[in-house]
Amino acid sequence: MIAKIIVDNKSKQVDKPFDYLVPKELEDKIKIGSRVLVPFSSGNREIEGFCVGTADTSDSKRLKSIIRTANDSIGFDEDMLELIEWMHKKYLASYLDIIHTIVPSGTALKTKEWIILENKSEEKSEIRRRITEILTDNGGSMEFKELKEMCGVDIQNQVRAMIKEGTLKKEYRQSVDIKDKKIKCVKLICDRETALESAENLRRKAPVQAKMLEVLSENEYVSLADLQKFTNGSHSTVKALEKKNLVNVFDMTVERDPYWNRVFEKTEKMVPTPEQEYAIDEITNSVKSGDGGIYLLHGVTGSGKTEVFMQTIENVINMGKSAIMLVPEISLTPQMVSRFMSRFGGRVAIFHSGLSAGERYDQWKKIRDGEADIVIGARSAIFTPLKNIGVIIMDEEHSDTYKSDMSPRYHARETAIFRASQFGAAVVLASATPSVESYYKAQTGEYKLLEMNTRYNKNKMPEISVIDMRSELEKGNKSMLSGKLYNEIEENLKRGEQTILFLNRRGFSTFVSCRSCGYVPHCPNCNISLTYHKFEDKLKCHYCGYERPNYKLCPKCGSNYIRYFGGGTQKVEDELNRLFPNATTVRMDMDTTGKKQSHEKILQKFEKDKIDILIGTQMVAKGLDFENVTLVGVITADTMLNINDYRSCERTFAMLEQVSGRAGRGSKEGRAVIQTYTPEHEAVSLVKSHNYRTFYDKEIAKRKLMWYPPFCKIVSVHFQGNVENIVAKTAKYFLNTAEKTQNISQKIQILGPVPSYISKIKNKYRWQIIFKCEDDDNLGEILSQAEMTCRKNKEFSDVAIIIDKSPGMIN
């Protein structure tokens, strides 16, 4: 039997299955997705591999054999292999990157090379004596890497010679980072009457042992730690009971539940509105018939889309099928989890990067073992090993966060549609502001359009005021808050109602500048100015993490005229504390949500402590539902409009409509104040009337005229390296190679090669080429071949080439 194995080696040259002989004793254990240990390369280093197929014969000669299975319970099945092959072709990602995205992080076997001292001998060489001494001092064995570091020189040849002579021995040892969590437990191995009788006999001489027996007689088992705590006993006391053949100590696997300390009150489904009922019935019937289909649920903010999700999922699981619910931000997960847990209880599994590796591992196992049939999470939840999927729902489907910017560079929407096709499942793409591409597909019949145009509570949509900040400056108002927004906040504070303020920029100031000479401090690693963070009094780069203390004097001219320009969430918070000293505030951005569960804690604090004002970046713009929030303020609507990207208008409209929709979701009417320097821009003006359709009509006309998606596909190719002229040369060579291919039989437009919008990040120079084409899948093979040609050229060996289909941004 031959197994086709993807080996754990990131080199592009080995991105293919290798044939290995399967030993007789392993033939029943090797199947699709099995994790195995195999010898690889000329040195036969033992590394992990994944089985992607089997065969009876092989064209290869001198096949090596699989050593053993490895962590075999954590792999993938044939459905996932089909997905892996599709992603490999679709996104031009390596098999290994895709597999590592699908299997739980921390479960990979880490192989380390150990050197063992077998026989001591008189060594003439000083370095060989040093090797022997270090090994002796460390118990006779060490990891080779540590041994080499302690020797301080390259010892490869010496170690190889000493192994050949029999002085040393080499072996490979494997370990994993994440395992099942186990705790020591104690249980009786005698009947209850015998335990109580023994307790009575032990009461005088060994009262603690007697107490332990009494506790155990009332319980099936007790954790060792609790038993010792309850009885003031010790491990030796338990050992004594073990010797008397009264108790047994055993390991129990326990789940790391991220919500173990939460109580969710049971809720019942609501009576749906006619619009909700129609949507629920349409989707449910498609699942029942097995036809699946792709639905675009376009519902205004507050129209009750979440209730549609939950009632649809309830219908699906009543059919014996399962469901995936995707949300775009980790910050949205706590509220969604709370609602689903309250409705469905323990049949829900949670999966996102905010969990610890151990928690994600346990949730993955819960899904694989069929203990959960509803999965809620961010984009990576689409890869969970759920079976018999009936529906996949993407809330806020327009969000950029559904696109991965690391290999594999997949889009969750496309991946969800592929996974649904494997099971005949329905896909529901939901948003108050659908992406232009999705709405176009709904208009042309590729998706089925479901619309919900009224709020569930029949409340009016928030009344929106657009404030021209240019006129505020003319009035002498230099504050971050317009007079209108100030008055509205003051009114909310008087009424005891809550406010959300949105600014899509963290930090205190956008940049620092010397007013004397014009000097602006830049990151030494990236071609971008540093952002001032007042709380720490530091300048930080939001791309590479570089930071330094703030300047008190200009390093260029020595002037003390250091001034701060622009403003971030910290500055807004500072201004509010000055203008409304009695108001309570909380801030939600990347600086305040770095710790585990910080999103949930901030939102809970805002709701339960009735904090007056929540200040935040895009984390507060989508999906949040607080009954007492009646005012939303947008500090500046222009930040995204000025990004050099064809989607900037769409992103701005969506963000403004979404954040405005956080107001008035309860019984009280809502209002929003949008501050801008370009009130005439359609992305701003059309939000005032919540007019998505008019915005779409204008935007789709521009896209057609300029030949942008959905009328074409876009592929970006990025080049990154340490030497700028080599990076530029690689980009030009790549394009020249691709253009020589005779297989380009479609309309195509090429932009570049040119330096990227941010031309240096983390000391890497960046160039790019943009390909606009009719079919990016047909172009993929040409680009992949051009990449391989560049990699064969030694001059370009240090330049990273990144091919990205449908990139989040093309600047």
Image (spheres, rainbow, N blue to C red):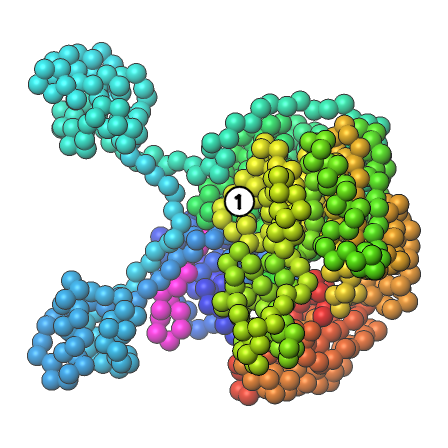
Query: Horizontally, is 377 left or right of 306 in the view?
Result: left
Compare residues 395 and 196 and report the one nearer the observer.
Answer: 395
Q: Report the magenta residues as a range.
A: 34-48
Q: Position of residue 372 (x, y in %)?
A: 55, 35
At mark 1, the secondary structure is helix
Compare residues 267 and 372 and report the one nearer the observer.
Answer: 267
Quarter of the image for residue 246 reads: top left
Q: Going 66% across and 82% down the picture, which residue do you hit?
A: 731
Question: Identity of the amino acid at label 1?
Answer: Ser
Q: Is residue 104 above or below residue 538?
A: above
Q: Going 15% across and 73% down the picture, which residue do you hit?
A: 132
Q: Residues within 10 Å of mark 1 (few under 14, many from 20)?
A: some
Q: Position of residue 297 (x, y in %)?
A: 79, 41
Residue 431 visible here: no
Mark 1 — residue?
Answer: 598
Query: Horizontally, is 224 left or right of 426 in the view?
Result: left
